[in-house]
Amino acid sequence: MPLPEPSPPIRAILRARVEAAIPALHGWTSVDKGARLAELVLIAGAERSVELGVFGGRGTISLAIGHEARGEGQVLAIDPWEKAASLEGENSPENDDWWGKLDHEAIYVSFVQALDASGTRPWCRVVRLRSAQAVAEVADGSIQVLHQDSNHSEAVSTAEVEQWTPKLAPRGLWIADDTDWVTTQRAQRRLVELGYELVEDHTSWRVYRKP
Protein backbone atom coordinates (compact mmCIF):
# COMPACT_ATOMS: atom_id res chain seq x y z
CA MET A 1 0.00 0.00 0.00
CA PRO A 2 1.48 3.39 -0.98
CA LEU A 3 2.14 6.04 1.63
CA PRO A 4 -0.30 8.95 1.99
CA GLU A 5 0.83 12.36 0.80
CA PRO A 6 0.81 15.74 2.55
CA SER A 7 -1.34 18.43 0.96
CA PRO A 8 0.25 20.45 -1.89
CA PRO A 9 0.57 23.60 0.27
CA ILE A 10 2.37 21.67 3.02
CA ARG A 11 4.67 20.01 0.49
CA ALA A 12 5.54 23.40 -0.97
CA ILE A 13 6.33 24.83 2.46
CA LEU A 14 8.57 21.90 3.40
CA ARG A 15 10.41 22.00 0.09
CA ALA A 16 11.05 25.72 0.35
CA ARG A 17 12.37 25.27 3.89
CA VAL A 18 14.70 22.44 2.84
CA GLU A 19 15.82 24.32 -0.26
CA ALA A 20 16.83 27.28 1.91
CA ALA A 21 18.66 25.13 4.46
CA ILE A 22 20.70 22.32 2.88
CA PRO A 23 22.27 23.10 -0.53
CA ALA A 24 25.33 24.83 0.97
CA LEU A 25 26.10 21.94 3.35
CA HIS A 26 28.56 19.09 2.93
CA GLY A 27 26.95 15.87 1.72
CA TRP A 28 24.92 14.30 -1.03
CA THR A 29 21.25 14.48 0.01
CA SER A 30 19.46 16.38 -2.74
CA VAL A 31 16.71 18.92 -2.18
CA ASP A 32 14.24 16.41 -3.65
CA LYS A 33 15.27 13.73 -1.17
CA GLY A 34 15.49 16.18 1.71
CA ALA A 35 11.98 17.44 1.06
CA ARG A 36 10.73 13.85 1.02
CA LEU A 37 12.49 13.08 4.29
CA ALA A 38 10.68 16.01 5.90
CA GLU A 39 7.39 14.76 4.43
CA LEU A 40 7.98 11.25 5.76
CA VAL A 41 8.28 12.61 9.30
CA LEU A 42 4.81 14.12 8.86
CA ILE A 43 3.36 11.06 7.15
CA ALA A 44 4.61 8.77 9.93
CA GLY A 45 3.47 11.12 12.69
CA ALA A 46 6.98 10.75 14.03
CA GLU A 47 7.73 11.70 17.59
CA ARG A 48 11.28 10.51 17.03
CA SER A 49 13.34 10.00 13.91
CA VAL A 50 16.95 8.87 13.58
CA GLU A 51 19.70 9.45 11.08
CA LEU A 52 22.57 6.98 11.11
CA GLY A 53 25.46 8.80 9.46
CA VAL A 54 24.97 12.56 9.58
CA PHE A 55 28.10 13.91 7.85
CA GLY A 56 27.35 17.57 6.98
CA GLY A 57 23.72 17.37 8.11
CA ARG A 58 21.67 17.54 4.93
CA GLY A 59 19.52 14.56 5.89
CA THR A 60 19.36 15.38 9.58
CA ILE A 61 18.26 18.96 9.00
CA SER A 62 15.64 17.78 6.51
CA LEU A 63 14.21 15.39 9.13
CA ALA A 64 14.34 18.18 11.72
CA ILE A 65 12.32 20.39 9.38
CA GLY A 66 9.66 17.67 9.41
CA HIS A 67 9.55 17.77 13.20
CA GLU A 68 9.46 21.55 13.11
CA ALA A 69 6.41 21.36 10.84
CA ARG A 70 4.77 18.90 13.26
CA GLY A 71 5.61 21.11 16.21
CA GLU A 72 6.92 18.17 18.22
CA GLY A 73 9.53 15.45 18.41
CA GLN A 74 13.17 15.41 17.37
CA VAL A 75 15.71 13.67 15.18
CA LEU A 76 18.61 11.83 16.79
CA ALA A 77 21.69 12.71 14.74
CA ILE A 78 24.00 9.72 15.19
CA ASP A 79 27.56 9.89 13.87
CA PRO A 80 30.99 9.63 15.53
CA TRP A 81 32.65 11.91 12.96
CA GLU A 82 35.82 9.82 13.12
CA LYS A 83 38.05 8.31 10.44
CA ALA A 84 38.13 4.81 11.92
CA ALA A 85 34.34 4.49 11.73
CA SER A 86 34.31 5.68 8.12
CA LEU A 87 36.87 3.03 7.16
CA GLU A 88 35.28 0.11 9.02
CA GLY A 89 34.43 -2.96 6.94
CA GLU A 90 35.39 -3.62 3.33
CA ASN A 91 34.98 -0.66 1.01
CA SER A 92 36.41 0.27 -2.37
CA PRO A 93 39.98 1.66 -2.36
CA GLU A 94 38.67 4.94 -3.75
CA ASN A 95 36.13 5.15 -0.94
CA ASP A 96 38.71 4.46 1.75
CA ASP A 97 41.17 6.93 0.23
CA TRP A 98 38.58 9.74 0.22
CA TRP A 99 37.33 9.12 3.77
CA GLY A 100 40.87 8.58 5.05
CA LYS A 101 41.90 12.08 3.98
CA LEU A 102 38.75 13.82 5.22
CA ASP A 103 38.90 16.27 8.14
CA HIS A 104 36.05 14.72 10.14
CA GLU A 105 36.23 17.29 12.94
CA ALA A 106 35.79 20.15 10.46
CA ILE A 107 32.71 18.43 9.04
CA TYR A 108 31.27 18.06 12.55
CA VAL A 109 31.84 21.73 13.31
CA SER A 110 30.18 22.75 10.06
CA PHE A 111 27.16 20.57 10.93
CA VAL A 112 26.72 22.16 14.35
CA GLN A 113 26.95 25.60 12.75
CA ALA A 114 24.33 24.54 10.19
CA LEU A 115 21.91 23.53 12.95
CA ASP A 116 22.10 27.04 14.35
CA ALA A 117 21.98 28.74 10.96
CA SER A 118 18.90 26.76 9.89
CA GLY A 119 17.10 27.21 13.21
CA THR A 120 16.62 23.46 13.57
CA ARG A 121 18.66 22.85 16.73
CA PRO A 122 15.50 22.60 18.94
CA TRP A 123 14.35 19.66 16.80
CA CYS A 124 17.64 17.73 16.90
CA ARG A 125 19.73 15.87 19.47
CA VAL A 126 23.30 15.12 18.46
CA VAL A 127 24.68 11.74 19.54
CA ARG A 128 28.38 11.59 18.74
CA LEU A 129 28.77 7.81 18.79
CA ARG A 130 28.96 4.96 16.32
CA SER A 131 25.53 3.54 15.56
CA ALA A 132 26.45 0.24 17.25
CA GLN A 133 27.10 2.18 20.48
CA ALA A 134 24.18 4.61 20.23
CA VAL A 135 21.61 1.84 19.78
CA ALA A 136 21.87 0.98 23.49
CA GLU A 137 20.59 4.46 24.37
CA VAL A 138 17.35 4.10 22.36
CA ALA A 139 14.26 2.31 23.63
CA ASP A 140 12.71 -0.47 21.57
CA GLY A 141 9.80 0.64 19.40
CA SER A 142 10.48 4.34 20.00
CA ILE A 143 11.39 5.42 16.45
CA GLN A 144 8.95 6.07 13.62
CA VAL A 145 11.42 7.07 10.87
CA LEU A 146 15.03 5.91 10.42
CA HIS A 147 17.40 7.10 7.70
CA GLN A 148 20.32 4.70 7.24
CA ASP A 149 23.19 6.65 5.67
CA SER A 150 26.28 5.64 7.63
CA ASN A 151 29.18 3.38 6.62
CA HIS A 152 28.03 1.55 3.47
CA SER A 153 30.16 -1.57 3.85
CA GLU A 154 28.22 -4.82 3.74
CA ALA A 155 29.19 -5.73 7.29
CA VAL A 156 28.18 -2.41 8.88
CA SER A 157 24.99 -1.83 6.87
CA THR A 158 23.73 -5.36 7.54
CA ALA A 159 24.60 -5.18 11.23
CA GLU A 160 22.63 -1.95 11.52
CA VAL A 161 19.52 -3.68 10.20
CA GLU A 162 19.80 -6.27 12.98
CA GLN A 163 20.67 -3.75 15.69
CA TRP A 164 18.13 -1.06 14.86
CA THR A 165 15.09 -3.04 13.70
CA PRO A 166 13.89 -3.53 17.32
CA LYS A 167 14.08 0.24 17.84
CA LEU A 168 11.71 0.97 14.96
CA ALA A 169 8.03 0.99 15.85
CA PRO A 170 5.58 -1.29 13.99
CA ARG A 171 4.74 0.30 10.61
CA GLY A 172 7.79 2.54 11.03
CA LEU A 173 9.72 3.69 7.97
CA TRP A 174 13.28 2.56 7.21
CA ILE A 175 14.94 4.76 4.58
CA ALA A 176 17.96 3.05 3.01
CA ASP A 177 20.52 5.19 1.20
CA ASP A 178 22.60 4.27 -1.86
CA THR A 179 20.50 1.21 -2.55
CA ASP A 180 22.19 0.80 -5.94
CA TRP A 181 25.57 0.06 -4.31
CA VAL A 182 26.73 -3.57 -4.32
CA THR A 183 27.70 -3.34 -0.65
CA THR A 184 24.17 -2.44 0.52
CA GLN A 185 22.39 -5.34 -1.19
CA ARG A 186 22.72 -7.79 1.69
CA ALA A 187 21.24 -5.28 4.16
CA GLN A 188 18.27 -4.74 1.86
CA ARG A 189 17.72 -8.47 1.49
CA ARG A 190 17.72 -8.73 5.27
CA LEU A 191 15.05 -6.05 5.53
CA VAL A 192 12.85 -8.09 3.20
CA GLU A 193 13.54 -11.28 5.16
CA LEU A 194 12.39 -9.47 8.30
CA GLY A 195 9.10 -8.64 6.62
CA TYR A 196 9.70 -5.05 5.57
CA GLU A 197 7.64 -3.87 2.60
CA LEU A 198 9.23 -1.74 -0.11
CA VAL A 199 6.90 1.25 -0.42
CA GLU A 200 9.03 3.71 -2.43
CA ASP A 201 11.91 3.12 -4.83
CA HIS A 202 13.90 6.20 -5.85
CA THR A 203 16.63 4.09 -7.50
CA SER A 204 19.48 5.35 -5.32
CA TRP A 205 17.42 5.25 -2.13
CA ARG A 206 14.38 3.33 -0.95
CA VAL A 207 11.71 3.50 1.73
CA TYR A 208 10.76 0.28 3.50
CA ARG A 209 7.89 -0.12 5.98
CA LYS A 210 8.23 -2.39 8.97
CA PRO A 211 5.42 -4.93 9.48
Image (spheres, grey):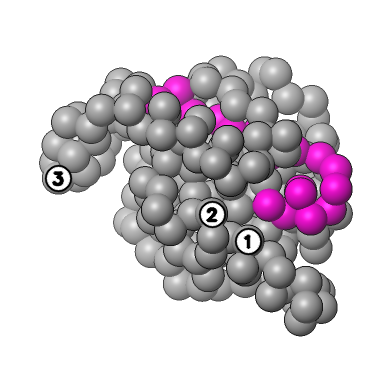
Residue type, numbered disc 2: Ala
Identify the image quadrant of residue 90: top left
Q: Which residue corresponds to mark 3?
A: 94
Would residue 200 be counted in the magenta stretch? no
Q: Residues within 10 Å of mark 2 (few under 14, many from 20)?
A: many
Give whichever of 32, 189 is nearer the camera. Answer: 32
The stretch in magenta equals 65-81
Mark 3 or mark 1, whichever is nearer to me: 1
Q: Residue at x 60, y 26 (%)?
A: 126
Residue type, numbered disc 1: Arg
Q: Which residue corresponds to mark 2?
A: 21
- SS assignment at label 1: helix
Q: Which residue corresponds to mark 1?
A: 17
Give whichever of 167, 105 is nearer the camera. Answer: 105
Rendering coords of residue 18 (x, y %) = 58, 60
State if disc 2 and disc 1 touch (CB < 8 Å). yes
- Marks 1/2: CA–CA distance: 6 Å
- Marks 2/3: CA–CA distance: 30 Å
In the image, residue 6 sits, relative to residue 42, either above or below, namely below
